[in-house]
């Protein structure tokens, strides 16, 4: 059953738009802009919106009354207070997480081998448990997939998540996901929205819908276990009370063809009161294009998404940085006050950090949801892809601001000092804010400069500021042995929005070079006088290249992202688009 609310253009009395949500000092100020201007027939407020050119129309709302949203906001305030307290006592909280994990596994094969029964501190744990990766854990994982118990954790593991990565031996990764991890992941997923609700003072969120752009549910029986993906498992394990305000419905959610799925979503939910959209950031603008096209087919005049979903103000992303996409997203939505809740997550433990809406760089760590964190300083690792078992690592409370680390986790599912393969840095240690800096196997490095994903992204942002333009997406590769020399150059492939390409491509390339020099000291030193690296090349891709590329490499699912760092094979593929 769905409640309904009617939006009438005659009730619109003005608007209060926040051009930079991160600059608003209090949640109440944002709440005023969210609730204060558009009246609906049942007396509730649905937020600022432009005049509906159709005069009056009906939005389908969830069956939940406003009181449910008010209760959710109260719960959110309690949780955020506990979270903030945990961040003020990180050493105590993280040590408790570790002790609980170790105590639970003390009688397992791994626990007995490493003396878990006697471990009381992180120092003892670090002295007894070596750094590991998928290959070192895989014999135990394989045994657990046959139904064996008592190996890494005492209980039987029913679910194994098929990670998008692969092991160093080229094998697919099947990672254990314990029921306890599922519960912790539900908590950390709620955390990401709780902080948003408290920051904005949103007390009517559940009266509308959250639209999830997720892949079809996969749950393949393999002997005594199920092979799945983490998003699929979270969907299956979603609490029943949240399903009332979640869309799409199963018959649409399970569509495998993602392009067709987005078309169906746009057609089906055009008149739903969508309050949030969750998924991989790069798909949001594609959905919005299809929504506007669906409205046009019905003869409905809509200049932007806000004319159709006037209460959509929050997007929940993750997996890639939102910054390159936000100009396009804001343009499609027709508003500047849209907020993106960014998350740092992995199959190995769930959500580790999320946006805190402070306006500061980085995402706020979540230290009390069943994961213990350790970090190997990159400067101590001569080979990032082969970090030694007894490499020096530091706990969360021992990290330093702006240093580059390889992150390792210990989890309730039986991962112990497990290397994720991610590079991270902390933008703050009071509180602890983290940012993803790239993959240990995914740096551009022609002269040992180890340029990361984030450094490339920031160099592009620098260029976009210096030479105004809007990108659809972009990636970077390297040419080695340029002009018959031993020197190299970076090659930036970028598709620009039609009508929003740089006025001067050469100037854009120079600005990108300047940005790289600012971000990476070794790159800067090797660029000086072209001593080791030539000036970068900019390849402007034809319209539609990003979509064509993703299809050509077989990455068309919701979890697929345009790669920031391109290998030689993909570099050559993109060059063919320009030549054809």
Image: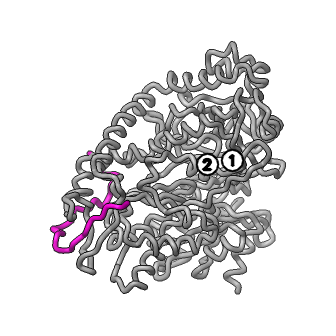
Q: Nearer the viewer, residue 400 or 27?
A: 27
Q: Is residue 175 magenta?
A: no
Seen as rendered, the residue at the extreme front is 1
Residue 71: give x, y in percent of width and height. Answer: 31, 42
Q: Give the magenta part as a residue range.
A: 1-26
> Within 10 angstroms of label 1, few (less than 14), some, or many (20 or more) residues?
many
Is residue 579 depicted above or below 393 in this figure?
Answer: below
**Residue at 46%, 55% in the rendered image:** 316
Q: Residues within 10 Å of mark 2 (few under 14, many from 20)?
A: many
Residue 530: % across, % down: 67, 63
| Disc 2 versus disc 1: nearer the observer | 2
**Quarter of the image that includes the N terminus:** bottom left
In this view of the protein, which residue sits in the foreground, 166 or 294? 294
**In the drawing, what numbered circle is on residue 161?**
1
Residue most extreme to the top? 118
Q: Residue at x 54, y 77 (%)?
A: 505
Tag 1 or tag 2, which sits nearer the N-term? 1
Q: Viewed as shown, does residue 9 lie left or right of 79?
A: left
Q: Would residue 347 be seen by someone viewing this image from the given angle?
A: yes
Task: Name the residue: 67% across, 82% down.
Answer: 578
Residue 5 painted magenta: yes
Q: Are marks 2 and 1 in contact (CB under 8 Å)?
A: yes
What residue is shown with label 2? Answer: 233
> Residue 229 vs residue 269: left or right?
right
| Quadrant of the rendering where the C terminus is positioned | bottom right
């Amino acid at each position: 059953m769905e409640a309904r609310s009617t939006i009438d253009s005659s009730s619109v009395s003005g608007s209060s738009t926040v051009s930079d949500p991160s600059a608003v000092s209090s949640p109440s100020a944002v709440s005023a802009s969210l609730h204060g201007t558009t009246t609906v027939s049942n007396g509730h407020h649905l937020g600022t919106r432009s005049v509906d050119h159709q005069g009056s129309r009906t939005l389908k709302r969830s069956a939940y009354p406003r009181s449910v949203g008010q209760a959710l906001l109260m719960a959110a305030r309690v949780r955020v207070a506990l979270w903030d307290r945990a961040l003020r006592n990180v050493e105590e909280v993280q040590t408790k997480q570790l002790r609980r994990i170790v105590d639970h596994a003390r009688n397992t094969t791994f626990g007995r081998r490493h003396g878990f029964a006697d471990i009381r501190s992180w120092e003892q744990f670090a002295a007894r448990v070596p750094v590991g990766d998928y290959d070192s854990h895989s014999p135990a994982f394989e045994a657990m997939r046959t139904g064996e118990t008592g190996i890494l954790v005492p209980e039987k593991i029913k679910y194994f998540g098929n990670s998008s990565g692969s092991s160093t031996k080229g094998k697919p990764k099947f990672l254990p996901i314990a029921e306890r991890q599922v519960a912790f992941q539900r908590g950390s997923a709620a955390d990401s929205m709780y902080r948003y609700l408290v920051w904005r003072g949103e007390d009517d969120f559940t009266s509308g819908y959250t639209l999830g752009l997720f892949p079809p549910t996969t749950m393949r029986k393999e002997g005594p276990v199920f092979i799945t993906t983490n998003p699929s498992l979270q969907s299956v394990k979603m609490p029943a009370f949240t399903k009332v305000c979640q869309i799409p419905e199963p018959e649409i959610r399970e569509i495998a063809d993602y392009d067709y799925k987005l078309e169906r979503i746009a057609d089906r939910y055009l008149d739903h009161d969508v309050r949030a959209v969750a998924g991989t950031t790069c798909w949001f603008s594609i959905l919005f294009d299809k929504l506007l096209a669906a409205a046009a087919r019905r003869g409905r005049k809509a200049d932007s998404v806000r004319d159709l979903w006037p209460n959509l103000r929050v997007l929940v992303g993750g997996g890639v940085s939102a910054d390159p996409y936000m100009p396009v997203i804001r343009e499609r939505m027709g508003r500047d006050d849209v907020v993106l809740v960014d998350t740092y997550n992995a199959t190995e433990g769930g959500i580790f950090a999320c946006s805190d809406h402070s306006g500061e760089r980085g995402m706020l760590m979540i230290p009390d949801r069943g994961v213990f964190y350790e970090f190997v300083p990159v400067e101590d690792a001569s080979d990032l892809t082969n970090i030694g078992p007894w490499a020096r690592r530091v706990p969360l409370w021992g990290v330093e601001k702006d240093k580059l680390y390889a992150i390792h986790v210990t989890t309730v599912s039986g991962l112990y000092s497990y290397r994720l393969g991610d590079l991270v840095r902390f933008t703050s240690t009071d509180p602890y804010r983290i940012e993803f800096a790239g993959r240990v196997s995914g740096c551009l490095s022609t002269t040992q400069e180890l340029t990361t994903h984030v450094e490339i992204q920031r160099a592009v942002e620098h260029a976009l500021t210096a030479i105004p333009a809007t990108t659809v997406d972009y990636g970077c590769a390297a040419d080695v042995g340029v002009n018959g020399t031993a020197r190299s150059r970076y090659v930036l492939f970028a598709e620009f929005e039609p009508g929003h390409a740089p006025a001067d491509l050469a100037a854009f390339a120079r600005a990108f070079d300047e940005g790289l020099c600012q971000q990476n000291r070794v790159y800067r030193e090797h660029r000086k006088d072209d001593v080791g690296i030539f000036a970068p090349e900019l390849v402007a891709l034809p319209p539609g290249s990003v979509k064509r590329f993703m299809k050509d490499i077989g990455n068309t699912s919701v979890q697929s992202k345009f790669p920031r760092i391109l290998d030689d094979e993909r570099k050559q593929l993109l060059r063919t688009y320009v030549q054809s």
